[in-house]
Amino acid sequence: MKESFFKNKRVLITGHTGFKGSWLTLWLDQLGADITGFSLNPPSNPYHYKFLELENKIADVHGDIRKAEDVAKAVRDYEPQMIFHLAAHPILLSSYSDPVDTYMTNTIGSLNVLEAARKFGNVRSFVNVTTDKVYANIGKMDAYKEGEPLGSNDPYSSSKACSELITQTYRQSFLSDTGVTTARAGNVMGGGDWGKYRVIPDLVQSYVHKKEIEIRHPDAIRPWTHVFDILNGYLTLGEMAYERPKEYSGPWNFASGVVKTVEDLVKEFSNHWSIRYRIGKAKLHEDKLLLLNSDKSRKRLKWKPLLDFETSVKMTVDWYAYFYNNTRDKKPISRYSLLQLNNFRNNLRKNSA
Ligand SMILES: NC(=O)c1ccc[n+]([C@@H]2O[C@H](COP(=O)([O-])OP(=O)(O)OC[C@H]3O[C@@H](n4cnc5c(N)ncnc54)[C@H](O)[C@@H]3O)[C@@H](O)[C@H]2O)c1
């Protein structure tokens, strides 16, 4: 990624108050982008974005992607050149209890963003953040490549596969001069995530409140990747799609290549924190194994993850430890978030030199 590329670029980030969105907003602010953030209510309390003190640096729009007029107004008013679409109903388990909202947010929401780009925008690059779970999981041991069939067994994954299809249709039917892409990544770790039904926020609760937690699907294998590595992928993709829309449009996988189970993750956290857990009974279906092949991103975007599994866990542990041990002294976590991000950026520069 060429950092100078983003200076003064008008960028719309949907879901900027969420876990990934907050880090992406912080990063793009460091790069001098002209940012509009568009989100509904924050996904949790507390939430990372609140601590970053970015409200006065970006255009902060409170809106609902399920409402076409909200999205159209933001695109008309701020005329983004790039869109990173992250706003979503992102939790697999809660998609079972609220399938309609999941589909409304993840499919109609994506449609509204693409339609606003078609009607009102001068958007050169569009990155739709979906998930590794969009693939039809046929239980194979090999990692999935971008060309393989979509299809899923639960409302969340299926709604994201629908979002992929809508994006593909808009790319082919309407937005031929725009780099229209989708970015598929799996489970992400890092500081600042308090999402429900996610294993790392559960581990944090065990650490903070010294309570036993229940681990479902202990033997499920996930492609754990640090949020900075994934965001580096999104930014690189956004830049390349802007520069060469025809060549870079389409789907892209991003995964670290780490093959570890949920229980491996819990044990790695236990090397830092005393964690009490029991293995619970899974009531709802989640795929056991789904691996992503990121060769295309590695070759054509020159993307490569920098943080190994142990370092990613350590950085996550350090972030939460800082958060919970320093808030009483009122030392801002924003400084610590920036420190971690800028260390990573230095690392990235060294690696691409
Ligand atoms: N975190 C992960 O491990 C992971 C893994 C794979 C894919 N993803 C995808 O990455 C994206 C970001 O995930 P996250 O973990 O940051 O989620 P998050 O829950 O932390 O944040 C979601 C964001 O979307 C916004 N939002 C929700 N509904 C909205 C609506 N109707 N209108 C406007 N804004 C709305 C929320 O306000 C919030 O800003 C999502 O698309 C998710 O599906 C996440």
Image (tube, grey):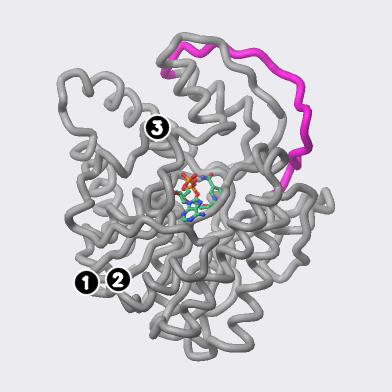
In the image, which residues are magenta?
272-290
State the quadrant of the C terminus.
bottom left
Q: Does residue 141 lie above or below 148 as drawn?
A: above
Left or right of residue 292: residue 9:
left
Is the CB atom of the residue marked by disc 2 within 8 angstroms of ligand 1's nearest atom? no
Residue occupied by mark 3: 45
**Disc marking residue 7:** 1
> Which residue is nearer to you in this view: 107 or 252?
107
Q: Amino acid at mark 2?
A: Lys
Residue occupied by mark 2: 2
Q: Which mark's residue is nearer the viewer, 1 or 2?
A: 1
Q: Earlier in the sequence, mark 3 or mark 1?
A: 1
Q: Residues within 10 Å of mark 3 (few under 14, many from 20)?
A: few
Q: Earlier in the sequence, mark 1 or mark 2?
A: 2
Q: Residue at x 69, y 52 (%)?
A: 157
> Magenta residues: mostly which secondary structure?
loop
Q: Residue at x 42, y 77 (%)?
A: 240
> Which residue is nearer to you in this view: 31 or 14?
14
- Observer able to see residue 257: no
